[in-house]
């Protein structure tokens, strides 16, 4: 049974667990800027949401594990709050692409222009 034992170890575990949330999401998803620029078609959005689920599952597992180790709900609560904020930001990016967003495999995104010295522009 989990009983409240708020101390430095519990707070430390809460901070570590909550701090891992962005790492799990970043491992499964591109940056918010990239999502807004290239998440323009239904297949992209479906893949992004699958990444949200996978990253959230891993983050929640760490938060739960930290709570079990601390015998306190604080790490799980901190993880859930951090995860909620991050998912709102990702969903906002998915639902509000840049007006000129195109699928990442659009030919215009694949073209590279170089000057006489080999520098891309």
Image (cartoon, rainbow, N blue to C red):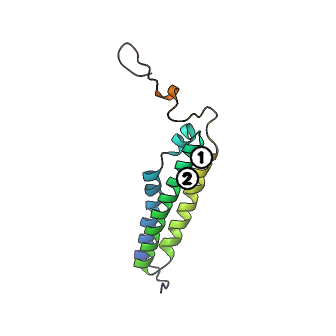
Q: Residue at x 54, y 38 (%)?
A: 38
Q: Nearer the viewer, residue 106 or 119?
A: 106
Q: Determine whether 69 is above or below 108 in the image.
A: below
Q: Position of residue 32 (x, y in %)?
A: 53, 45
User: To which quarter of the image does residue 113 belong?
Assistant: top left
Q: Position of residue 119 (x, y in %)?
A: 38, 20
Instruction: Count how many numbered circles sit on residues in the image.
Output: 2
Q: Position of residue 29 (x, y in %)?
A: 48, 49
Q: Nearer the viewer, mark 2 or mark 1?
A: 2
Bin the neighbour count of mark 2 within 10 Å (Cα to Cα): few under 14, some 14-19, many 20 and up: some
Q: Position of residue 89 (x, y in %)?
A: 58, 52
Q: Residue furthest left?
A: 117
Bin the neighbour count of mark 1 within 10 Å (Cα to Cα): few under 14, some 14-19, many 20 and up: many
Residue beneath disc 2: 49
Question: How far is mark 2 from mark 1, CA to CA?
Answer: 9 Å
Q: Residue at x 50, y 83 (%)?
A: 4
Contact flag, marks 2 and 1 (Cβ < 8 Å): yes
């Amino acid at each position: 049974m989990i009983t409240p034992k708020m101390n430095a170890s519990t707070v430390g575990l809460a901070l570590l667990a909550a701090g891992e949330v962005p790492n799990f999401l970043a491992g499964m998803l591109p940056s918010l800027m990239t999502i807004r620029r290239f998440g323009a078609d239904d297949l992209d959005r479906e893949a992004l949401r699958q990444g949200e689920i996978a990253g959230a599952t891993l983050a929640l597992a760490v938060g739960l594990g930290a709570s079990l180790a601390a015998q306190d709900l604080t790490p799980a609560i901190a993880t859930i709050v951090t995860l909620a904020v991050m998912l709102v930001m990702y969903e906002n990016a998915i639902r509000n692409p840049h007006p000129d967003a195109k699928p990442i495999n659009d030919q215009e995104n694949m073209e590279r222009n170089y000057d006489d010295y080999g520098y891309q522009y």
